[in-house]
Image (cartoon, helix red, strand yellow):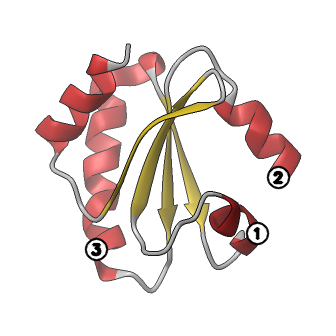
Amino acid sequence: MKSNFKDIINDSKPVLVDFFATWCGPCKVLAPILSEVKAELGEAIKIVKMDVDKNQPLASEYQVRGVPTLILFKNGKQLWRQSGVIQKAELLQIIQSFN
């Protein structure tokens, strides 16, 4: 997964990675927000869900200490990150500021 992940985040369009866990309540709140963001932005963004329990080395590499943690990448570089639930309007504004 690790080498594949590098390929995914190395895209020229923004890639939003949602580090989540299946047992996490706030992650469940965030999921429909991410779906709405994807529906609104379409092909302008990739949204990737990363289960921290199944991908612990990757979560550790990106210093994910709590879930949910969102990290926005473009061309393999981390542009922004935040832990916790974020509202749709704020997330859209952040993503569009890097486009």
> Image check: 28 left or right of 21?
left
Tell me: residue 54, above or below residue 2.
below
Position of residue 47 measured from the top left corner of the image (x, y, whole percent): 49, 39
Tell me: residue 10, above or below residue 34.
above
Splitting the image into 4 quarters, where does residue 67 fall?
A: bottom left
* Residue where numbered disc 1 is placed: 57
Label 2 vs label 1: CA separation? 8 Å
Position of residue 45 measured from the top left corner of the image (x, y, whole percent): 46, 25
> Image check: 22 left or right of 58?
left
- The reply to whether the C-beta atoms of the residues labelled 2 and 3 are less than 8 Å apart is no
Give the secondary structure at mark 1.
helix
| Dot 2 amino acid type | Lys
Residue at (25, 67) in percent of width and height: 29
Give the secondary structure at mark 2.
helix
Crowd class of label 2 (few under 14; some 14 to 19; many from 20; radius 10 Å): few
- The reply to whether the C-beta atoms of the residues labelled 3 and 1 are less than 8 Å apart is no
- The reply to whether the C-beta atoms of the residues labelled 2 and 1 are less than 8 Å apart is yes
Question: Observer-nearest residue: 73 or 29?
Answer: 73
Q: Quadrant of the N terminus?
A: bottom right
| Dot 1 amino acid type | Pro
Q: Earlier in the sequence, mark 3 or mark 1?
A: 3
Give the secondary structure at mark 3.
helix
| Dot 3 amino acid type | Pro
Position of residue 17 measured from the top left corner of the image (x, y, whole percent): 52, 47
> Image check: 76 left or right of 42?
right
Residue at (32, 31) in percent of width and height: 39
* Residue where numbered disc 2 is placed: 2
Q: Which mark is residue 37?
A: none
Q: Earlier in the sequence, mark 2 or mark 3?
A: 2
Q: Quadrant of the C terminus?
A: top left
Question: Observer-nearest residue: 39 or 62?
Answer: 62
Between disc 2 and disc 3, the foreground one is: 2
